[in-house]
């Protein structure tokens, strides 16, 4: 296995475009984010799907979905560094969710993502 270390500052969409441009099979890449190993470029799809289901009445075409996809790394970093209030505020700004829904999502799916092996 070949190890390539890339430091990337940008959105998930930009990272995906970069990987697609520079690698033949980016879906097979092993990515490390926030110290955790994750597989493939569809890294945050599960979190997005959970958000869509979590904030009832939303659909995958909600205007905030792409913004959330781009901001997930930032939200995860806030949770990882124990800045939950800032993460909840940021999430509420993106999705217009209520305080309880934002808190539950930050303490649920986002925190679980960081704890997952």
Image (tube, helix red, strand yellow):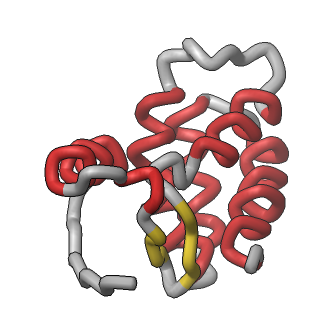
**In the image, 11: left or right of 97?**
left
Question: Tag count in the figure?
Answer: 0
Q: Relative to residue 94, is residue 36 depicted above or below?
A: below
Residue 6 in the image, given as x and y percentages of width and height: 22, 77
- The residue that appears at 21% across and 65% down in the rendered structure is 9
Residue 66 in the image, given as x and y percentages of width and height: 44, 30
Residue 7 in the image, given as x and y percentages of width and height: 22, 77
**In the image, 10: left or right of 52?**
left
Q: Nearer the viewer, residue 31 or 90?
A: 31
Q: Relative to residue 21, is residue 106 depicted above or below?
A: below
Q: Report which quarter residue 38 is drawn in.
A: bottom right
- Quadrant in the picture for the N terminus: bottom left
Residue 20 in the image, given as x and y percentages of width and height: 25, 45
- Quadrant in the picture for the C terminus: bottom right
- The residue that appears at 80% across and 29% down in the rendered structure is 53
Q: Nearer the viewer, residue 99 or 58?
A: 58
Q: Nearer the viewer, residue 54 or 103?
A: 54
**In the image, 22: left or right of 24?**
left
Q: Report which quarter residue 61 is drawn in.
A: top right
**In the image, 8: left or right of 32?**
left
Q: Relative to residue 87, is residue 55 depicted above or below?
A: above
- The residue that appears at 71% across and 66% down in the rendered structure is 113
């Amino acid at each position: 296995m070949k190890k390539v270390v890339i430091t990337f500052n940008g959105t998930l969409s930009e990272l995906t475009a970069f990987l697609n441009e520079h690698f033949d099979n980016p879906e097979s890449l092993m990515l490390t984010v926030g110290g955790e190993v994750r597989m493939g470029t569809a890294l945050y799809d599960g979190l997005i799907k959970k958000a869509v289901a979590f904030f009832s009445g939303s659909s995958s075409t909600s205007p905030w979905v792409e913004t959330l996809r781009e901001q997930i790394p930032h939200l995860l970093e806030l949770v990882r560094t124990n800045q939950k209030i800032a993460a909840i505020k940021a999430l509420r700004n993106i999705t217009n969710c209520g305080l309880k829904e934002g808190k539950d999502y930050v303490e649920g799916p986002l925190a679980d993502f960081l704890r997952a092996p």
